[in-house]
């Protein structure tokens, strides 16, 4: 049966971020994707220059109204990640999410900041916390964003597990902390991510599965990897709806293969001893098609 995704994210003409990072890999895995570009820029903001336009909430709603009038507004998933940084576009998404119906799942990547610093206006936080998270089925914050949403600091793994439980109480059945500052037992060359999924048993009772993943760090700055992570988590959760471990292992392994191919290409293009440019570090997405379809598992999740 055809599975259709409405993706509300930013868009770039050159490179991979937002909808450009999500659409191709979802299509490779058999999903039909309708995209609303909340932002359309020439390229991502890691370059020295960029130009483009921002979609207002009214313009977003006009686009959706056209879809609705033609009676083709039937989706299995809504995916939202990096959008414009205005309150109005986020509010427009909340209005859109309020149309959520039975069997429609919302995955939200609450893009607000990282490493203790917000890179969106502070008035975005209550929109995510009070509106968006409540309608999300899957939530993919980093540690800092999870702390913002719950008002709780994370210093230990126990703290992180409790924060994910708080986020469950706010709405989502699945929460994945895509990156944390926690120290890996394997050393500081590994990044720790955590996941939690609430499931309903046949007898109506609930259980929660929690996992930890440790991923090798790469000495480079990539743009669009968070958007790719969210898209792949949506896809692999669809294929493994009751197996958080399998869904996350395949998601992280896709990222590993794409990043490895990208850094190899970027270093070759930059030349010996030179740091690659933002253009050289654009994700090698098309070249990674086979890894997206059939990811060799390189990171095994530990069930906690």
Image: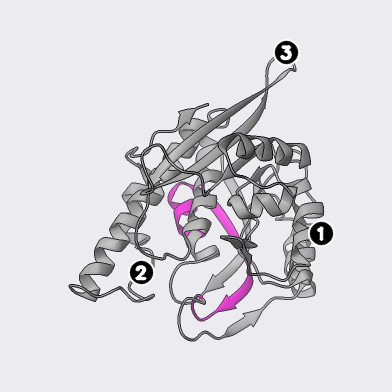
* Image label count: 3
In the foreground, 48 or 21: 48
Residue drawn where x is 66% and y is 49% of the image: 146
In the foreground, 186 or 300: 186
Label 1 Cα crowd, 10 Å radius (few <14 / some 14-19 / many 20+)? some
Q: Earlier in the sequence, mark 3 or mark 1?
A: 1
Q: Earlier in the sequence, mark 2 or mark 3?
A: 3
The residues bearing labels 2 and 3 have C-alpha atoms spaced at a distance of 50 Å
User: Depth-wise, is mark 1 or mark 2 nearer the camera?
Assistant: 2
As helix, strand or loop, the secondary structure at mark 3 comes to loop
Residue drawn where x is 30% and y is 55% of the image: 260
Q: Which residue is mark 1?
A: 95
Q: Position of residue 149 (x, y in %)?
A: 72, 51
Asked if labels 1 and 3 touch by Cβ distance under 8 angstroms, the answer is no
Q: Earlier in the sequence, mark 1 or mark 2?
A: 1
Q: Position of residue 91 (x, y in %)?
A: 79, 64
Q: Which residue is mark 3?
A: 203
Residue drawn where x is 55% and y is 71% of the image: 11
Q: Which residue ends up furthest to the front in the rendered image?
A: 155
Q: Is residue 51 visible?
A: yes
In the foreground, 221 or 243: 221
The residues bearing labels 1 and 2 have C-alpha atoms spaced at a distance of 36 Å
> Is residue 168 placed above or below 148 in the rendered structure?
above
- Per the rendered image, the range of residues in magenta is 22-44
For residue 281, which numbered disc appears in the image?
Answer: 2
Q: Which residue ends up furthest to the left in the rendered image?
A: 272
As helix, strand or loop, the secondary structure at mark 2 comes to loop
How are the residues colored? one colour
């Amino acid at each position: 049966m055809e599975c259709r995704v409405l993706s509300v994210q930013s868009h770039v003409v050159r490179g991979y971020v937002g909808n450009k990072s999500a659409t191709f890999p979802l299509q490779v895995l058999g999903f039909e994707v309708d995209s609303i570009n909340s932002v359309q820029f020439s390229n991502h903001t890691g370059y020295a220059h960029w130009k483009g336009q921002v979609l207002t909430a009214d313009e977003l709603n006009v686009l959706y109204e056209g879809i609705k009038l033609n009676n083709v507004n039937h989706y299995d998933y809504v995916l939202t990640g990096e959008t414009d940084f205005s309150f109005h576009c986020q509010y427009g998404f909340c209005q859109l999410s309020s149309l959520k119906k039975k069997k429609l799942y919302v995955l939200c990547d609450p893009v607000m900041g990282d490493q203790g610093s917000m890179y969106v206006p502070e008035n975005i936080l209550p929109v995510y916390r009070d509106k968006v998270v409540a309608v999300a089925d899957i939530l993919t914050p980093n540690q800092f964003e999870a702390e913002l949403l719950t008002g709780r600091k994370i210093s230990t793994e126990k703290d992180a597990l409790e924060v994910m439980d708080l986020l469950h109480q706010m709405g989502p059945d699945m929460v994945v902390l895509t990156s944390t500052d926690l120290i890996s037992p394997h050393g500081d060359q590994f990044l720790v991510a955590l996941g939690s999924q609430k499931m309903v048993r046949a007898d109506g009772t609930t259980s929660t599965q929690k996992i930890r993943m440790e991923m090798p760090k790469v000495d480079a700055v990539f743009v669009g990897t968070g958007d790719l992570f969210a898209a792949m988590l949506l896809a692999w959760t669809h294929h493994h709806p009751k197996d958080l471990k399998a869904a996350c292992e395949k998601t992280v392994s896709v990222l590993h293969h794409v990043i490895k191919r990208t850094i190899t290409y970027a270093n070759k293009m930059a030349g010996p001893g030179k740091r690659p440019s933002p253009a050289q570090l654009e994700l090698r997405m098309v070249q990674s098609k086979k890894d997206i379809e059939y990811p060799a598992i390189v990171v095994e999740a530990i069930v906690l």
